[in-house]
Amino acid sequence: LSQSACAYKTMTTRSTIAPMITRIGLISDTHNLVRPEALQHLAGCDAIIHAGDICEQAVLDALGQIAPVTAVRGNNDIGDWARALPTHATLTAQQVTILVVHDIAEVDADPRSKGIGVVVTGHSHKPLIDERDGVLFVNPGSAGPRRFRLPVSAGLLIVDGARATATLHSLLT
Protein backbone atom coordinates (compact mmCIF):
# COMPACT_ATOMS: atom_id res chain seq x y z
CA LEU A 1 0.00 0.00 0.00
CA SER A 2 2.72 2.49 0.87
CA GLN A 3 4.64 1.71 -2.34
CA SER A 4 1.54 2.46 -4.42
CA ALA A 5 1.08 5.70 -2.54
CA CYS A 6 4.70 6.67 -3.25
CA ALA A 7 4.36 5.82 -6.94
CA TYR A 8 1.20 7.94 -7.15
CA LYS A 9 2.93 10.90 -5.52
CA THR A 10 5.84 10.60 -7.93
CA MET A 11 3.48 10.59 -10.94
CA THR A 12 1.60 13.60 -9.57
CA THR A 13 4.84 15.51 -9.06
CA ARG A 14 6.02 14.77 -12.59
CA SER A 15 2.77 15.91 -14.17
CA THR A 16 2.92 19.24 -12.34
CA ILE A 17 6.55 19.86 -13.23
CA ALA A 18 6.28 18.94 -16.93
CA PRO A 19 2.76 19.54 -18.28
CA MET A 20 1.82 17.52 -21.32
CA ILE A 21 2.21 19.23 -24.69
CA THR A 22 -0.76 19.04 -27.07
CA ARG A 23 -0.01 18.73 -30.80
CA ILE A 24 -2.84 19.88 -33.06
CA GLY A 25 -2.54 19.36 -36.80
CA LEU A 26 -3.91 22.23 -38.90
CA ILE A 27 -5.25 21.68 -42.39
CA SER A 28 -7.57 23.55 -44.73
CA ASP A 29 -8.84 23.75 -48.27
CA THR A 30 -8.31 20.10 -49.13
CA HIS A 31 -11.01 20.29 -51.82
CA ASN A 32 -11.56 16.51 -51.67
CA LEU A 33 -7.85 15.68 -52.01
CA VAL A 34 -6.25 13.76 -49.15
CA ARG A 35 -2.56 13.81 -49.95
CA PRO A 36 -0.33 11.11 -48.43
CA GLU A 37 2.01 13.95 -47.45
CA ALA A 38 -0.80 15.57 -45.45
CA LEU A 39 -1.57 12.31 -43.65
CA GLN A 40 2.12 11.89 -42.84
CA HIS A 41 2.28 15.47 -41.51
CA LEU A 42 -0.74 14.87 -39.25
CA ALA A 43 0.40 11.48 -37.95
CA GLY A 44 1.06 11.59 -34.22
CA CYS A 45 -1.13 14.64 -33.57
CA ASP A 46 -3.45 14.63 -30.57
CA ALA A 47 -6.17 16.41 -32.56
CA ILE A 48 -6.77 17.84 -36.03
CA ILE A 49 -8.46 21.09 -37.05
CA HIS A 50 -9.81 21.39 -40.60
CA ALA A 51 -10.65 25.02 -41.45
CA GLY A 52 -13.10 24.24 -44.25
CA ASP A 53 -13.45 23.56 -47.96
CA ILE A 54 -13.37 19.86 -47.27
CA CYS A 55 -15.75 19.01 -50.14
CA GLU A 56 -16.52 15.37 -49.19
CA GLN A 57 -17.18 13.48 -45.94
CA ALA A 58 -14.50 10.94 -46.94
CA VAL A 59 -11.82 13.58 -46.21
CA LEU A 60 -12.99 13.89 -42.60
CA ASP A 61 -13.24 10.11 -42.31
CA ALA A 62 -9.61 9.74 -43.42
CA LEU A 63 -8.44 12.42 -40.98
CA GLY A 64 -10.50 10.86 -38.20
CA GLN A 65 -8.44 7.69 -38.52
CA ILE A 66 -5.47 9.72 -37.22
CA ALA A 67 -6.99 11.83 -34.43
CA PRO A 68 -10.24 13.51 -33.37
CA VAL A 69 -11.23 16.18 -35.90
CA THR A 70 -12.80 19.59 -35.38
CA ALA A 71 -14.00 20.93 -38.73
CA VAL A 72 -15.94 23.91 -40.01
CA ARG A 73 -17.92 24.35 -43.20
CA GLY A 74 -16.28 26.33 -45.99
CA ASN A 75 -17.88 28.05 -48.97
CA ASN A 76 -17.35 24.93 -51.13
CA ASP A 77 -18.83 22.50 -48.59
CA ILE A 78 -22.34 21.75 -49.82
CA GLY A 79 -24.81 18.89 -49.52
CA ASP A 80 -26.38 17.01 -46.64
CA TRP A 81 -23.08 15.93 -45.07
CA ALA A 82 -21.85 19.56 -44.96
CA ARG A 83 -25.01 20.99 -43.38
CA ALA A 84 -24.05 19.17 -40.17
CA LEU A 85 -20.80 21.14 -39.97
CA PRO A 86 -20.76 24.43 -38.07
CA THR A 87 -19.48 27.63 -39.68
CA HIS A 88 -17.61 28.48 -36.45
CA ALA A 89 -16.13 26.13 -33.85
CA THR A 90 -14.48 26.83 -30.53
CA LEU A 91 -12.35 24.33 -28.68
CA THR A 92 -10.03 24.45 -25.71
CA ALA A 93 -6.65 22.74 -25.52
CA GLN A 94 -5.20 22.95 -22.05
CA GLN A 95 -5.59 26.66 -21.19
CA VAL A 96 -5.88 27.97 -24.77
CA THR A 97 -9.21 28.66 -26.46
CA ILE A 98 -9.13 28.22 -30.24
CA LEU A 99 -11.64 29.68 -32.69
CA VAL A 100 -11.96 27.99 -36.09
CA VAL A 101 -13.66 29.71 -39.06
CA HIS A 102 -13.18 29.29 -42.78
CA ASP A 103 -12.97 32.95 -43.77
CA ILE A 104 -11.08 35.45 -41.62
CA ALA A 105 -13.71 38.05 -42.55
CA GLU A 106 -16.06 36.19 -40.16
CA VAL A 107 -13.82 36.81 -37.12
CA ASP A 108 -14.95 39.48 -34.66
CA ALA A 109 -12.74 42.57 -34.44
CA ASP A 110 -11.56 41.69 -30.92
CA PRO A 111 -11.41 37.90 -30.39
CA ARG A 112 -9.21 38.41 -27.33
CA SER A 113 -12.12 40.06 -25.48
CA LYS A 114 -13.99 36.75 -25.85
CA GLY A 115 -11.08 34.77 -24.38
CA ILE A 116 -9.78 33.51 -27.74
CA GLY A 117 -6.04 32.86 -27.82
CA VAL A 118 -5.75 31.32 -31.30
CA VAL A 119 -7.76 31.83 -34.50
CA VAL A 120 -7.45 29.21 -37.25
CA THR A 121 -8.78 30.12 -40.71
CA GLY A 122 -8.55 28.93 -44.30
CA HIS A 123 -10.16 30.19 -47.53
CA SER A 124 -7.30 32.30 -48.94
CA HIS A 125 -5.01 29.30 -49.58
CA LYS A 126 -2.18 31.54 -48.30
CA PRO A 127 -0.26 30.12 -45.34
CA LEU A 128 0.14 32.69 -42.57
CA ILE A 129 1.14 32.98 -38.93
CA ASP A 130 0.54 36.37 -37.35
CA GLU A 131 0.03 37.69 -33.84
CA ARG A 132 -2.37 40.57 -33.33
CA ASP A 133 -3.19 42.06 -29.94
CA GLY A 134 -2.11 38.90 -28.13
CA VAL A 135 -4.06 36.54 -30.42
CA LEU A 136 -2.24 34.03 -32.64
CA PHE A 137 -3.77 33.88 -36.15
CA VAL A 138 -2.92 30.82 -38.25
CA ASN A 139 -3.93 29.93 -41.79
CA PRO A 140 -2.33 26.60 -42.69
CA GLY A 141 -2.79 27.32 -46.40
CA SER A 142 -4.21 24.74 -48.79
CA ALA A 143 -3.40 21.04 -48.58
CA GLY A 144 -5.52 20.34 -51.66
CA PRO A 145 -4.96 20.99 -55.36
CA ARG A 146 -2.37 23.68 -56.01
CA ARG A 147 -3.92 27.06 -56.75
CA PHE A 148 -1.96 29.58 -58.80
CA ARG A 149 1.61 29.61 -57.46
CA LEU A 150 0.66 29.22 -53.82
CA PRO A 151 2.37 26.49 -51.78
CA VAL A 152 0.64 23.27 -50.77
CA SER A 153 0.89 23.31 -47.00
CA ALA A 154 -0.44 22.42 -43.57
CA GLY A 155 0.37 23.57 -40.06
CA LEU A 156 1.00 22.45 -36.53
CA LEU A 157 -0.18 24.12 -33.33
CA ILE A 158 1.69 23.26 -30.15
CA VAL A 159 -0.11 24.04 -26.89
CA ASP A 160 1.81 23.97 -23.63
CA GLY A 161 -0.35 25.17 -20.75
CA ALA A 162 -1.47 28.71 -21.60
CA ARG A 163 1.07 29.11 -24.44
CA ALA A 164 0.47 28.28 -28.11
CA THR A 165 2.96 28.33 -30.98
CA ALA A 166 2.43 27.48 -34.62
CA THR A 167 4.54 26.30 -37.54
CA LEU A 168 3.79 25.90 -41.25
CA HIS A 169 4.98 22.98 -43.32
CA SER A 170 5.25 22.65 -47.09
CA LEU A 171 3.74 19.34 -48.20
CA LEU A 172 5.29 19.38 -51.67
CA THR A 173 8.76 20.42 -52.74
Image (spheres, rainbow, N blue to C red):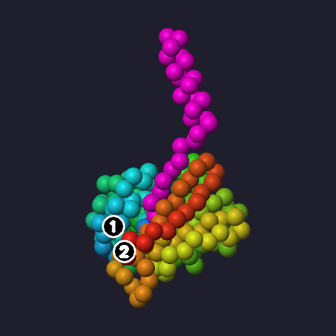
Give the magenta part as a residue range: 1-26
Q: Is residue 88 visible?
A: no
Q: Position of residue 57 (x, y in %)?
A: 30, 66
Which residue was labeled with disc 2?
Answer: 172
- In terms of depth relative to the viewer, which is nearer, 15 or 135? 15
Residue found 38% across the figure and 71% down from its top: 171
Q: Magenta part mainly helix, strand or loop? A: helix
Residue found 39% across the figure and 59% down from its top: 42
Q: Position of residue 159 (x, y in %)?
A: 56, 53
Decide if residue 173 is on the left or right side of residue 36. Answer: right
Decide if residue 48 is on the left or right side of residue 131. Answer: left
Residue 37 circle label:
1
As drawn, the residue found furthest toward the bottom would be 148
- In terms of depth relative to the viewer, which is nearer, 49 or 39? 39
Residue found 58% across the figure and 50% down from its top: 160
Tag 1: residue type?
Answer: Glu
N-term mark: 1 or 2: 1
Of the 4 image quadrants, the one containing the C terminus is bottom left
Tag 2: residue type?
Answer: Leu
Q: Are marks 1 and 2 in contact (CB under 8 Å)?
A: yes
Q: Position of residue 144 (x, y in %)?
A: 36, 76
Q: Position of residue 121 (x, y in %)?
A: 52, 71
Q: Quick check: is 97 in the magenta stretch? A: no
**Local SS, label 1:** helix
**Local SS, label 2:** loop
Q: Is residue 85 visible?
A: yes
Q: Residues within 10 Å of mark 2 (few under 14, many from 20)?
A: few
